[in-house]
Image (cartoon, rainbow, N blue to C red):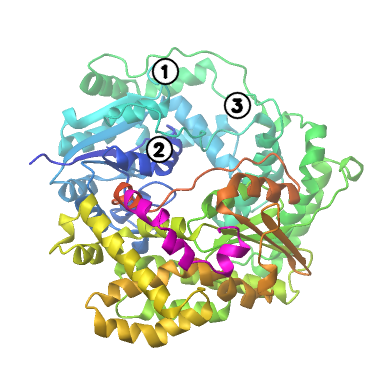
Amino acid sequence: MTKKKINLHIGYHKTGTTSIQFALSRNRDGLLDHGYLYPKSGEKWNAHHNLAWQLQETNRYDRFEPELGSWEDLIEEIETSVAENIILSSEDFCYARPPSIVKIAEYLQPYEVNIIVYLRRQDQYLQSKWIQIAKLGKSLPTFSEWIDEELDRNQFLDYAAILDRWAKVFGTPNIIVRPFEKEVLGTGLIVDFLRLCGLEFIDWFQQTKSKNVSPSVQAMALVRKITNNLPDLSGIQVTTPEFKQLMARTRNLFDLQNVKKDKINFITNDLHQRIMSRFSVGNKEVANNFLARNELFLEPFTEKPITDLESAQLDANVLQKLEVKLLIRTFKKILENIDEEHLFAPKDQSSSTADELSKISSLVLSDSEIEKKDETKYNVIVYQMGKVGSTSIVESLSNLPEVEAYQSHFLGSENLHTMLDLALASDVHPHILKHQKGQIMKNLDLTRLVLAHLQGRMGDIKLGIVSITREPIDWFRSQIVQQAPAYLEGFATLAGLDDKELLDGASIQTALRKIKENFKQTLKQLGPPINLELSRNYRQVYTPILREQDQNADIFITHFKHFMRPFLWYPKMVSSVFDIKDEILRLNVEGFQFVKSEWGFLYLFRYEDLSTGFERLIHYLGNDNIPLSRNNISTDKIFSKEIKQAFKEWESDGELKNLIRSDYTRRFGYE
């Protein structure tokens, strides 16, 4: 039997890893259709960082999160997948020590393994690293002052030593080394990576924009102007998420404007020679061992103008649009509320430290140069039932300086208690429980935020609730795909199979056909329309009868409960939490609904109109230049193609569509 093949991408840092990982995550469906699994186990930020962190010998950063999945979960996912090729990616694998690499080899022993690594010329790597740290708001010396200390302590720039660790375990022939240079990557980084994995770049693969790109000179100059005038704040700059978010907004505001994006460059010819001579022996060793040539990097050094961030002139016209004073006020508010865990000074001193920030405004613009305009800030919660593009919307809204964006599936104390009861149930599937645990903690915090808004305790900050509907049969199909690992045993039982490993397209179609027929029988017995009363009758009256009549009752009950979610979601999750009458929760003739309130607004639209709905939202929030990220993919794709094929019967079943006519289908235009 042919072994499954693992393509293990270990980095390096600063070689486009974020872009590769985002592209793989976005194209998870298409990859699986072509026999490639990009696993969910161990995934953090679109990459498999949690797997790298699990094997860290010292866990001083305490990064490993068991709920995100472990190596053991990964192996189970690989074994249950139909894919013969697997792609794993995390630049933090390059930090692995020899014992950890041996452990990785033990986990992957049943498979054929290739190690893929991109290497960047060390002087370019160091410059990119300085920019990465500085753009997050850390107060650093200039690049020329920083470089010597970094060269002395950064052992990971000795590429020969790092690759030798991996070659000793996996073998030199199984290490694929790619210099991160334009000539090598002539067709593009993503195309090059896919080819290394054995895939040609074809029409089905959706191209994505580069991620984690370097900021413009103007953006970095403003960040430096702020951070260089904040004495003794290194602690907050490194550890506070709010600070990092503020720095990101400062950069993004520039880069969203049509500012000429000059590239930052600190590397003189002398500095290039000094850095590269330090690594010349190791680089030659890498070239000989892995590329069968004498030089690792072939691109000649080209001297470019040197950037002086400290004296860069900021474009006043752009600054005027960026509301710099608004950024500074936000920054002051962060410091005024910071505690000693994040700031070296005690809490009672933090406000006096924050007072020093008032001087920053004079360093940027005077009051007369700031355009006066509406400065309303919003906490926007994309509040929905799942599988409606919420991740895309939240990611895109995060680019707006006046918006803090979140997503949630349930809010309010009653709904929190319901979810807790479900999580405590003895029969909950581990796959679903892992998802529920994280959701409960996140939504507890969001419920507290919502209550603060509803009780008028958030001052001038307004609340925005954005909710998206979806055609119920299509929503249920997407739900089945997402939670497929929890359903496979039930599918096998309904198809008359002894083991879920025997499932194929025909047996899945058989199982879903039986579920559909059970739903129709149930709806006929209870009588449409689907509403809260039908839900109560189903639980209290029909469920006991069904359990007596059918040995597979629990399988049908689980699926019917999920199937009803769209129909019941708005009365249970929206009307009761925000005290909004059900009659208001409907779309107008233009296909949306917008309700204003003292605490903010509620905005409804359909998933089928996602692009238009999003454009209308950002226009209301005061910005027409933010694109929708389109990061809308399911979280698990086992049998996704087979499930989609089976649901064609559901979509063409006129009797079923008549039975699901309800307030939901009428109010949101699905009849």
**How far apart are labels 3 and 1 at the CA level?**
22 Å
Residue 264, disc: 3
Residue occupying the point 59% across, 43% down? 628
> What amino acid does circle 3 point to?
Ile
Q: Is residue 317 left or right of residue 218?
A: right
Residue occupying the point 65% across, 73% down? 582
The mark closer to the camera, 3 or 2, is 3
Report the span colored magenta: 645-671
Residue occupying the point 70% across, 48% down? 616
Q: Quadrant of the N terminus?
A: top left
Task: Locate residue 108, reporting x and y percent.
Answer: 18, 47
Residue 154, disc: 2
**How far apart are labels 3 and 2 at the CA level?**
22 Å
Do we see residue 559 in this rendering?
Answer: no
Residue 289, disc: none
Residue count near mark 1 (Cα–Cα under 10 Å), binned few <14, some 14–19, many ≥20: few
Q: Earlier in the sequence, mark 3 or mark 2?
A: 2
Q: Secondary structure at mark 3?
A: loop
Q: Nearer the viewer, residue 85 or 563?
A: 563
Residue 186, disc: 1
Check the image and report above or below for 403 versus 427. Answer: above
Q: Secondary structure at mark 2?
A: loop
